[in-house]
Amino acid sequence: MSTQAEDMEASSRPKSIDLDPVDLESDEKSNIAPAYKQDAFGNEEFAEVKYKVLKWWQCGCLMVAETVSLGVLSLPAAIAGLGFVPALIILVGLGLLATYTGYVMGQMKLRYPQITTMADAGEVLAGKWGREFLGACYIIFLIFIMSSHLLTFTVAMNTITDHGTCSIVFGIMGMIISFFCSLPRTLVNMSWLSLVSFASIIIAVLVGMIGVGIEKPGSGVVAVLDTDLYHGFSAVCNIVFAFCGHAAFFGLMAELKDPRDFTKSLCLLQGFDISLYLVASVVIYRYAGDGVTSPALGSASPVVAKVAYGLALPTIIIAGVINGHVAFKYVYVRIFRGTDRMHKRDWVAVSSWVGIALSLWIIAWIISSAIPVFSDLLSLITALFASWFTFGLSGMFWLFMNWGKWFSSPRKIALTVLNIIIIGIGAALCGLGLWVSSKAIHDNSSSASFSCANNA
């Protein structure tokens, strides 16, 4: 009887696709943990507010919306900083690597269902200290992403209005709009906004490419650029930023109706973003040349840039809102986890969400005003956080899930080496990236904090 029971239990466990699937048996800690630790949202059968209702394509659209917007705008300048050939090799290579690391995160979620954020993953890896450390890094990173979108909003508004008013006013305007868009508490409601963002970035980039292609403002293509470590690595950081959506992945998986569908969502994201990045960055760099700006929409003529930025406003706002939503949800769940408060529509539940959202958007606005240079802010974010959330930590997750099996077969040996290299890539991006971004922020004479000046 015991053998039959064990077989039935094993058959009920989630299966992974055949890409070195990990053993998805629950570990001893998972078995003794309280029910709410297994799933932050618990049983939602009779809940007023239900979270676990996302379909895979809705999750995929959310992933596209929160990842692609800012990333694609920095890539043509990255190609100009590295040269055409090295930049494309790095772009495709990091895109494929980001696909693999995203898959590993999906396996981590299936193995440990209690994970809803990077903080939960930190607790699995290193107990309460891991939870607090990664939780702090996680919320700081998401706030920096939010601030990047507020900064891009000010650039867009300065371009559209010919610096019609103080940049600080535009930043406050973006903060208010983003706050009101953040009020829905479930990702399924945010998914409809993601469709608008999806269409917005495609149309805006197409307009930008057509405008640059007609005007041809650049001076041609440089296949391999003779650059120094400082400028070259700054460009690499901007490419890494284009794939830095991983921090939100656990939060998105937590609201999937079936977390095993995450692989399909990941394929939708990576297929779309790698293709768009290649086409947009190559075309814009081909015609804008070394003078390409970051964000890239500024490389077109004033009229085309205004049109493109106007079309891009929805994705600039919505992408920041989705990352903000994930940040708010981390704080919200941290406060109410283990209670039924999250599933209610009473005054405490709603006012808590509104208060968290307002507080974090104010902090994001302060950061965006303090570091008002787009490329410098991207480099700082990438160095501090994206290096680990996108690459380094995924390598650690794989090594943790396969503890004791690293050298059990030639395939495991190869994957062990790969994941150690991924950790090394994360460490190198963090160390060198911090040096590059710190120097850029220090040296850039236009980096006046809380300035009304035109940053377009």
Image (cartoon, rainbow, N blue to C red):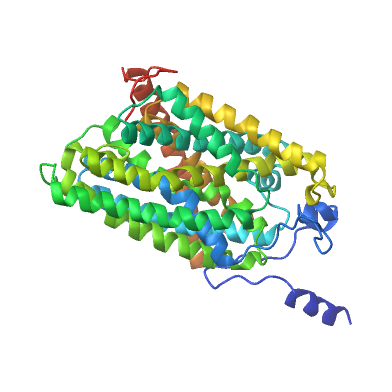
Q: Quadrant of residue 435?
A: top left
Q: Which of 371/177 is in front?
A: 177
> x, y (%) of residue 18?
54, 73
Q: Residue at x 58, y 28 (%)?
A: 362
Q: Residue at x 84, y 62 (%)?
A: 46
Q: Residue at x 49, y 67 (%)?
A: 411
> x, y (%) of residue 110?
66, 62
Total number of numbered discs in the rendering? 0
Single out the residue that lies furthest toward the right: 1
Q: Quadrant of residue 219?
A: top left
Q: Which of 175/121 is in front?
A: 175
In the image, residue 134 above or below residue 364: below
Question: With 165 as the anchor, is 320 left or right in this view?
Answer: right
Q: Which of 187/406 is in front?
A: 187
> x, y (%) of residue 252?
61, 55
In the image, residue 392 above or below residue 440: below
Question: With 15 as the anchor, is 302 left or right in this view?
Answer: left
> x, y (%) of residue 53?
68, 63
Q: Quadrant of the N terminus?
A: bottom right
Q: Quadrant of the C terminus?
A: top left
Can residue 421 be spotted in the picture?
A: no
Question: With 152 as the anchor, is 229 left or right in this view?
Answer: left
Q: Residue at x 67, y 56 (%)?
A: 254
In the image, residue 211 above or below residue 291: below
Q: Which of 141/358 is in front?
A: 358
